[in-house]
Amino acid sequence: DGGVEMPGSSAPHVVPVPQSDPSAVDPEEAFVACIASCHMLWFLSIAAKRGFVVDAYADDATGTMARVAKGRLGITEVVLRPRVRFHGLAPDAATHEAMHLEAHEMCFIANSVKSDVRVVPTLA
């Protein structure tokens, strides 16, 4: 079917091994990765439309889990730290930041969650 298989499991610090698999992605990691990949795909699309060629894109995205108003845990913040390297002509810092802002505004996933999503871009 062409699909990608990604093993999932609860986090070992929540559900001890052997009931969890430390090599698998836990739901919280998948949540952060989903937001990061949505942002990346929008950014790549915006860059291409503006005539920029992206040579490399990496993101050290993180999520913060904390108690929420009802006394339950939730991912309250996701911070994306994309590092982009361009081939040939690169945008200036202001244009680069504006492209990330546009990507953030267009990301369906970021628009669908309660978590605060921040983007801290770096030109590589």
Image (cartoon, grey):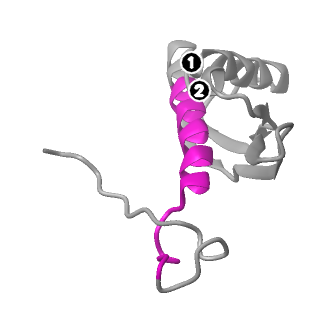
- State the residue in front, 71 or 32: 71
Distance from Cα at disc 2 to Cα at disc 1: 5 Å
4 relative position to 44: left or right: left
Say what amino acid the circle numbered 1 marks.
Ile
Q: Residues within 10 Å of mark 2 (few under 14, many from 20)?
A: many
Q: Is residue 5 above or below residue 102?
A: below
Disc marking residue 46 = 1
The answer to which quarter of the image holds residue 74 is top right
In the image, farthest residue toward the front: 70
Q: Residue at x 79, y 24 (%)?
A: 97
Say what amino acid the circle numbered 2 marks.
Phe
Q: Residue at x 53, y 28 (%)?
A: 44
Residue marked by disc 2: 43
Look at the image and tell me whether residue 98 can be seen. Answer: yes
- What percent of the width, then of the height, locates residue 114? 72, 28
- The residue tagged with tag 2: helix, strand or loop? helix
- What percent of the width, then of the height, locates residue 102? 68, 15
Q: Residue at x 51, y 30 (%)?
A: 41
- What percent of the width, then of the height, locates residue 28? 61, 53
Residue 4 in magenta stretch: no
Proximity of marks 2 and 1: CB atoms separated by less than 8 Å: yes
- What percent of the width, then of the height, locates residue 47? 57, 22
The quadrant the N terminus occupies is top left
83 relative position to 68: left or right: left
Q: Residue at x 53, y 66 (%)?
A: 10
- State the residue in front, 68 or 1: 68
**Numbered range of the magenta stretch:** 19-44
Residue 23 in magenta stretch: yes
- State the residue in front, 44 or 105: 105
Q: Residues within 10 Å of mark 1 (few under 14, many from 20)?
A: some
- Main SS of the magenta part reads helix
